[in-house]
Image: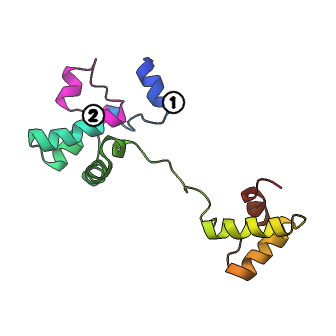
Amino acid sequence: MDASPRYRALQAVGLLHPAPQRVSAEAFQAHPQFFARFDKVQVKYEMLRTHALDGHSATAAAAAHGYSRASFYLVSDAFARAGMAGLMDERPGRRGPLKLSGEVLAFLAAASHERPEASGAELADELYAALGVRLHRRTVERALGAR
């Protein structure tokens, strides 16, 4: 394990390469002071560069950088879609409540404004009756600012 500030910074944000010992690309061997095999984003970029500019096959580029061929294509697609930002890992898990659309939030806001004494459970029942969207009472309460 490296104790450099760079290593610690990457570790803190979850950007360490999962298998740095498998990175065997020449640049990482010849210039370890610049090319850090533990830097996931740098390794991914160099993998793509090796393929695009040095003419290595996708399989060879992926293997030299500690990735599978399938991973190479996922990284390549992400880079084509979003540039350097595409080389960052996406946050795992859902991106927020799936059922809290604008329409649902507007309905809940209007209903709670009309009847401020209504409980989260009552508003959830009204929402289901009106829009067919079933929410837990706590989800309704959180959406309305923890009533």
- Tell me if mark 2 has few (under 14), some (14-19) or many (20+) residues whose alpha carbon lies within 10 angstroms of its own: many
Q: How is the image coloured?
A: rainbow
The residue under label 1 is which amino acid type? Ala
At x 32%, y 32%, the residue is 21
Is the residue under label 1 in contact with that under label 2 (CB below 8 Å)? no
Q: Secondary structure at mark 2?
A: loop
* Magenta-drawn stretch contains 38: yes
Residue 122: x percent and y percent?
A: 84, 72
89 and 27: which is toward the camera: 89
Residue farthest to the left, as pictured:
55
Where are the magenta residues, as a range? Answer: 21-42
The residue labelled by disc 2 is 23
Q: Which circle's residue, 2 or 1, is located before the other in the chain? A: 1
32 and 75: which is toward the camera: 75
The residue under label 2 is which amino acid type? Val
* Magenta-drawn stretch contains 102: no
The residue labelled by disc 1 is 12
Residue 33: x percent and y percent?
A: 28, 17
At x 36%, y 42%, the residue is 85
